[in-house]
Image: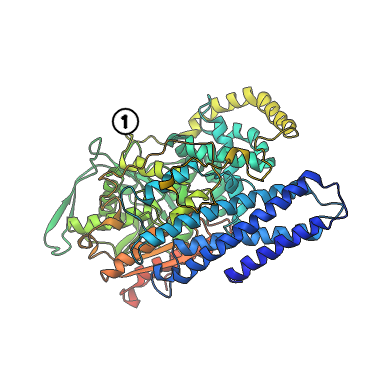
Amino acid sequence: MDHKEVFGALQTACSDVISALNESPNSSLGDHANRLLGLMRQIQEHGHAMKPLVTGFTSVYHHFDLDADTPGNGYRSLVKVVHSCTLHIIQKARYIASNCNGPFFRMEHNVAEIEAYCSALCQLRALLYLAQVLLNDNAHGQLYSHEKGGLSEKFVQEYISMHKACFYGRCLGFQFAPSLRPFLQTVVISMVSLGENYKKQQTGVGIAALSVFTSGKYLMNPDLRGAEFERITQNLDMQFWKTFWNLTETELLSGLSRIASSVVQVNLTFTVPAETLSLPLASDPSLSVSVPPPVAHWGPGPVNMRLVSHTLRQGQDNAELLAFSRPQGPQLSLPLAFNREAAPLSPYLVIHFHGGGFVAQTSKSHENYLKSWSKDLNVPILSVDYSLAPEAPFPRALEECFYAYCWALKNCHLLGSTAERVCLAGDSAGGNLCITVSMKAMSHGVRVPDGIVAAYPATLLTIDASPSRLLTLIDPLLPLSVLSKCIDAYAGIGSQSIQPAQQLDTLAALGQDTVNLLNNFTQRANDWFQSLIDQKGPTSSTTSSNGIPASSSRTKDRPEESREYPENFEPLRSRCLVDMQTPCTPIMKNPFVSPLLSPDSLLKGLPPVHIVASALDALLDDSVMFAKKLRKINQPVTLTVVDDLPHGFLSLVHLSKDTQDASDICVTRIREVLLKELPAAQRQPGLN
């Protein structure tokens, strides 16, 4: 069904509801029926206005693709999201038209559903207007607006003031694969529950456990959930996000992850001391180049790593490597493999840099798919636990990752590999580090990797506007306010102290947390039950007579020169505001921070780059424009755009077939890197 048929079906479905209500023999429907009639007329008006906008985008958005075989860019994504929202409304409207006069029809519930999607459609209409400004102002084929004081700053101000709660309540995750929506609901409920208990006298597991008692009201009241999520995303500090994202590091959650992940014979964490390395010069191996240990901010320091290998290989049980080891309880599986016969050294090595916005998580958060990759590829994988911002802003993480890469080349025999073929792999922030580590290798004259596989990489660490970044308004996993906090942290903006990041230590706090949990059990349970009782009274999100949330009233006093919308339209506005700045410091434009801004000379000589992105990721345009930049200078690059998945889909690999298929694409690309130009006789089983 193309967009013209979709908008035609939308008008018909709304008309059918209006007719069914007007012809109803039941005259006691009252206020709810009148509200529904008003909402249907609003939806029709939005549909009439959006149809020509979408028609305009569909006629030109192919010009922004990488090539004819790779359809994908932010304009396509916006149209896709509008299409998805419209189909949801059509389905709901058809149900209402067929059942509104039935004895079991829940009028109030269905009105609330339609109201939420009407609000979502209104906000998506606003995004289309903003995207139209981008389309008109930017150069042909250009997805980003880099002009100082242009739409980028206006977009940030729009983001701050626009109502977003509707996308986190009843409409949560409508744009993503249906298999992921229960997970997204769990994430958002967990986040708002944790946010309610944030900064109370609890730590680690205790906060997470206490949040269980407050999660019930957010499950039963999606409107309250949406409003609270909007408040959290715009107002809570970076420490909250680090705490929430690092919950995956706790033994309870990581233990559940291990149940679903592949079994490996080697899962060893170790620390490499800060010593200067000597590596052969790539252009003349008879000469050498010195690589110092990372020194930024607090001087020389060690680098933490994790070795994952499905099969125990020669060197991995070497005493030299074990001397560096950092046992992590049940996660250390290497001793169990000591009595096994070690396999020969692999000619392949994968070096991995994890995502987490440069501010959170470690290799432990990502080991579920790393174990699967090691099994599928039959290769050892070295994952680097680099220091995190804001305690360790740029360039500390880059220095540590580059040092780890050089150490791995020099000590590959300890990792079970001869490193004849080396592939860098990473997701999000890790994808950025894969690219910048390769750039740093070229600048130092050491061997560059044989290829890069980057999943949804961040290649532009600024708040410049692009059509895909408009999706941060509706994305529950990557809102613009959170993205900007991560960028500021990595760039060192607002950092008050610089010190080595501390490891998450939830087990040590478990005893005290348990005591606090028991002390608060009765009170929290009472609060939860009271919240259920309170829901029978007035809700926290009331609605005005025209169907617009009272907490999101329309604003008419904006300066005329700042308007991006027609005279008869204004998006819903939020009362949950935050002072969000848009600094663009020289660090953000540093090529080793934002490789998309690199001069061609720094990108010439990069190994083949394989990018796997998602059509619904706010960072999609990062991938498209970086691939275009590489292709323009004849650098080998591929781009694969998967459908219906959010940013961070690799961490969701075991949740659905869609995420597993996307992970398999990454495995295929890594396999291509490792096998290229390697004689068949040297290829090991598992990669053919």
Please state if 557 lies on the left or on the right of 31 as rendered: left
Q: Secondary structure at mark 1?
A: loop
* Residue 492 image point, x, y percent: 31, 39
Please state if 463 lies on the left or on the right of 158 as rendered: left
For the C terminus, the quadrant is bottom left
Residue 575, placed above or below residue 410: above
Q: Amino acid at mark 1?
A: Ser
Which residue of the protein is positioned furthest toward the bottom in this rendering?
A: 680
Residue 121, placed above or below residue 57: above
* Residue 37 image point, x, y percent: 73, 52
* Residue 39 image point, x, y percent: 68, 51
Residue 47, placed above or below residue 632: above
* Residue 656 image point, x, y percent: 58, 59
In the rendered view, how is the structure colored? rainbow
Front residue of this view, candidates 263 and 66: 66
Which residue of the protein is positioned furthest toward the left in this rendering?
A: 287
Please state if 638 lies on the left or on the right of 124 as rendered: left
Res 545 seen here: yes
Front residue of this view, candidates 666 and 112: 112
Residue 585, placed above or below residue 200: below
Q: Which residue is mark 1?
A: 497
